[in-house]
Image (cartoon, rainbow, N blue to C red):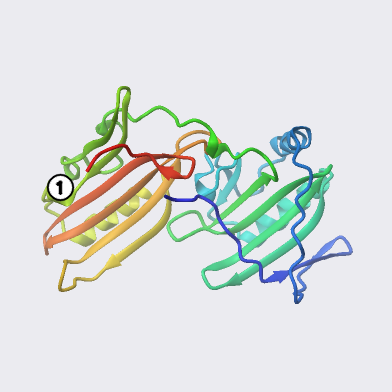
Amino acid sequence: MIRTRFTVALVAVLALIGGGYTWAALDAPVPVWVGATDPAHVAAANAMLAVLPTPAGMTLDPYGTGCDFATLYCFTSSSVEPEAAFAATTRALVAHGGRVRSHACSSHGLIEHACDAVVDYQGSGIDVVAGHSRPGNALTHLRLSVTGAANPQRSPASAPYGSWSSVGPLPAAWTTGTRCVTQEPTGCRRFDQPLDAAPRVAAPLAQMCAEVRSRIVGSYFLINDVNSPPSALRSASCGFFAHRFRTLGGHDGEVLVVTVQALDPQHSALHLMLCQWANGGCVRVGGR
């Protein structure tokens, strides 16, 4: 199971003073304002967001993959810092008739320069979240979502995959042991290559790890990558866990898990799993 929600820890509450932004830390957080969630209010807020200009220096990611969140309004940038993107977007929402209800930023632990605001637009709540992405992804992600809007992840799953060769993101010579483990009449929803079926590749571990990472970054949201030194039980390895949405607005997506294992200094093998997910979990029926 995975949950593609980015959670922001709020440690400093900011006060909006005199039309400008003053970053003032208080002892207690401001209660989150939700706003109206009926269809008419939600539709009005979404209509406004649809015509809101793309923030300067940012790119629209209609799949929402770069924000790790199922939203139609996801923007990423490799040059704009989160605070700048956040401030500019909040000002744009105010210029379009919004009113800031809460406004906070934090920078500690695993979360750096993350900002969150709730904007009141004609009674609807609009969440604005900006932050640094995990290493390997765009520098900054910015997302906007209407409070109370239907979760697009609850939409029906898209069509199954075709053959592995039509969807496999890695070199074909590395994945000749890949098989479908969740077969449907119209295609496959899960592919897997166990280590005991993986081909022996004439490439050292570092080379294969670098190649896998380069193919994941840019196409997937890289959730985690780990390098493991050799131990008494196993040889050195690297591992990647990533996902992306398959349909516009994040209706459903796919999870990619790859582990590269060193066989000796000049040879490696690759275990992988690629599966579709819907409603927050990987789809699997049967299989090993």
Q: Which residue is under mark 1?
A: 198
Q: Relative to residue 156, is residue 263 depicted above or below?
A: below
Point 67% across, 66% down: residue: 105
At mark 1, the secondary structure is: loop
Front residue (pair 207, 128):
128
Q: Position of residue 73 (x, y in %)?
A: 62, 42
Point 77% across, 34% down: residue: 44
Residue 260 quadrant: bottom left
Q: How packed is label 1: few (under 14 Cα within 10 Å), some, or many (20 or more)? A: some
Q: Quadrant of the C terminus?
A: top left
Position of residue 19 in the picture relative to residue 2 (left or right): right
Amino acid at dot 1: Ala
Residue 151 quadrant: top right
Q: Relative to residue 186, is residue 153 depicted above or below?
A: below
Point 33% across, 39% down: residue: 284
Q: Position of residue 204 (x, y in %)?
A: 16, 59
Point 74% across, 41% down: residue: 37
Position of residue 252 in the picture relative to residue 43 (left or right): left
Q: Position of residue 261 (x, y in %)?
A: 19, 59
